[in-house]
Amino acid sequence: MPAWLAHPAAARIIPFAIYIALLALSGMFADSTAFDVRWLYPVRVVLVALALGFFWKHYDELRGRFAMPGGYWSLSLVVGIVVFLLWVNLSASWMHRGAPGKGFDPRDGEHVNVALALFRIGGAALVVPVMEELFWRSFVMRWIDNPNFRAVIPAAVTFKALLLSSVVFGFEHNEWFAGIIAGLAYGGLYRVTGNLWAPTVAHAVTNGLLGAWVLYTRAWQFW
């Protein structure tokens, strides 16, 4: 393995880079009639999951630490629910980048394509939270304070690092304002608990609830 692949930063950057590259590719082919671009989402999820598996031995904050105190589980659940409620209610036009798009619509005609819907919810609730928390909280937020980011304990992360990383995280999403709030919530949870599983679980709860809500309300623009 090349030395740069063994770097802790690379292990956190590469899965995120794969996700963003395929997201951009989906945008490029959004109007294509040659193939159904929606199926790039399962491809994206599978490739990111494989990258996370490849680098798993480098994620010392996650390996063997899934057993959190009961209070952390409860706090993660509450934070995840609150972020979900804010996400679907912070809907003023200025809180979005550009006009709301059609989002990811898993319907074929009037019927939901079950495979597409399951890939979307599964990816958003199980893969994306791990990938994003490793990148945004474990890496970026601590790197802002010190390029040797692993030397920064979560409780010592400065407010500047929390705010800057949350702002950039927010603008990764069309719902940028809700994204900033989510970033502050997940980053704050990481600082308080010192356990990366806490924001990961909260993020998974948010995305899982959002997926169920989108399917129920057909508000595809949130996907």
Image: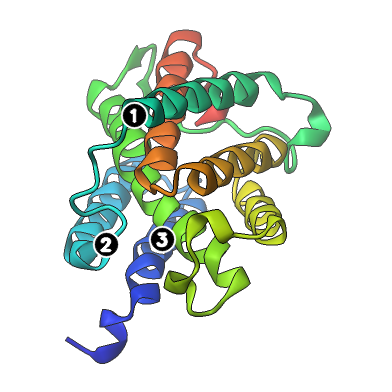
Q: Is residue 98 visible from the viewing direction of this image?
A: yes
Residue 207 lies left or right of residue 185; in this view the side is left
Q: Earlier in the sequence, mark 2 or mark 3?
A: 3
Label disc, if present, on residue 121 of the rendered structure: 1
Element assignment for label 1: helix
Q: From this view, report whether residue 30 is shown above or below residue 223.
A: below
Identified at 57% across, 60% down, the residue is: 156
Q: Which residue is mark 2?
A: 60
Q: CA distance from mark 2 to mark 3?
A: 18 Å
Q: How many callouts does the rendering have?
A: 3
Badge 2 density bin: few <14, some 14–19, many ≥20, Cα 10 Å: few
- Between disc 2 and disc 3, the foreground one is 2
Label 1 packing within 10 angstroms: few (<14), some (14-19), many (20+): many
Q: Which mark is residue 16?
A: 3
For this rendering, which residue is in front, 195 or 166? 195
Amino acid beneath label 3? Phe
Q: Is residue 20 above or below residue 88?
A: below
